[in-house]
Image (cartoon, rainbow, N blue to C red):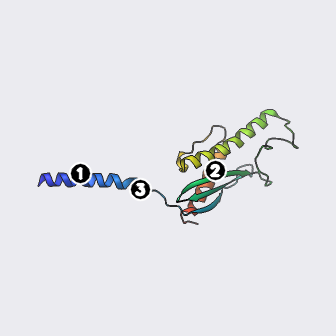
Amino acid sequence: MNRISGKCFWILLIAAALLLPGCGKKSYRDGVYTGKSGADEMGAWGEVTVTIKDGSVADCEFIIHQKDGTLKDEDYGKVNGEISNLDYYTKAQFAVRAMERYASSFRETGDLKKVDAVSGATVAFNQFTEAAGLALKKAAGGS
């Protein structure tokens, strides 16, 4: 009887090992979903648009709107269209590049937990994870 119990134990252990990787994996509905973060201390907010295809992340876009609604883009950090403070502009553009890095990393991994924060762009990271999490919640059937 011990031999049978031992065999049953191993069969159950192997079956559990095969089934567990699927547990906890979210199932997403195909479509395009958008999430918006709350505003930061300067009034800027992030917006993530996630495209789900065949239940997985197929594309991701991340933008940040400044308080006045303008985008943080190649002009972010300029004053009246000019670079008046190179140090400020350089730091601002570093954050813009980090925005694309977050979206790219998420596209590649399909897993929000595998997107790493970039030192010096943690506000953008927090906005990204909040907005992307809300978009994924919608894709999973939440509100």
From the viewer's perspective, is residue 66 above or below residue 141? above
Disc 1: which residue: 10
Tags 3 and 1 in contact by the CB under 8 Å rule? no
Name which of mark 2 and mark 1 comes first in the sequence.
1
Q: Position of residue 124 (x, y in %)?
A: 67, 46
* Amino acid identity at mark 2: Phe
Is residue 6 among what the camera can see?
yes
Q: Secondary structure at mark 3?
A: helix
Q: CA distance from mark 3 to mark 1?
A: 20 Å
Would you identify the image quadrant in which residue 142 lies? Answer: bottom right
* Percent of width and height locating residue 116: 57, 42
Drawn side of residue 1 relative to residue 122, left or right: left
The mark that comes first in sequence, 2 or 3, is 3
Query: Which residue is at the front of the view, 1 or 67?
Result: 1
Q: Where's the C terminus, which quadrant?
A: bottom right
Q: Which residue is the site of mark 3?
A: 22
Q: Amino acid at mark 3?
A: Gly
Residue at 79 percent across and 52 percent down: it is 70
Q: Which residue is more in the foreground, 82 or 11?
A: 11
Residues at marks 2 and 3, CA–CA distance in whole angstroms: 26 Å
In the structure shown, which secondary structural element does the residue marked by tag 2 occupy? helix
Structural crowding at the residue carrying mark 2, measured as other residues with C-alpha within 10 Å and reported as few (<14), some (14–19) or many (≥20): many
Q: Secondary structure at mark 1?
A: helix
The kind of residue tagged 1 is Trp
Which mark is in front, 2 or 3? 3
CB atoms of marks 2 and 3 within 8 Å:
no
Residue at x 71% of width, y 43% of height: 96
Q: Is residue 134 visible?
A: no
* In this view, the mark in front (2 or 1): 1
The residue wearing badge 2 is: 128
Q: Is residue 17 left or right of residue 114?
A: left
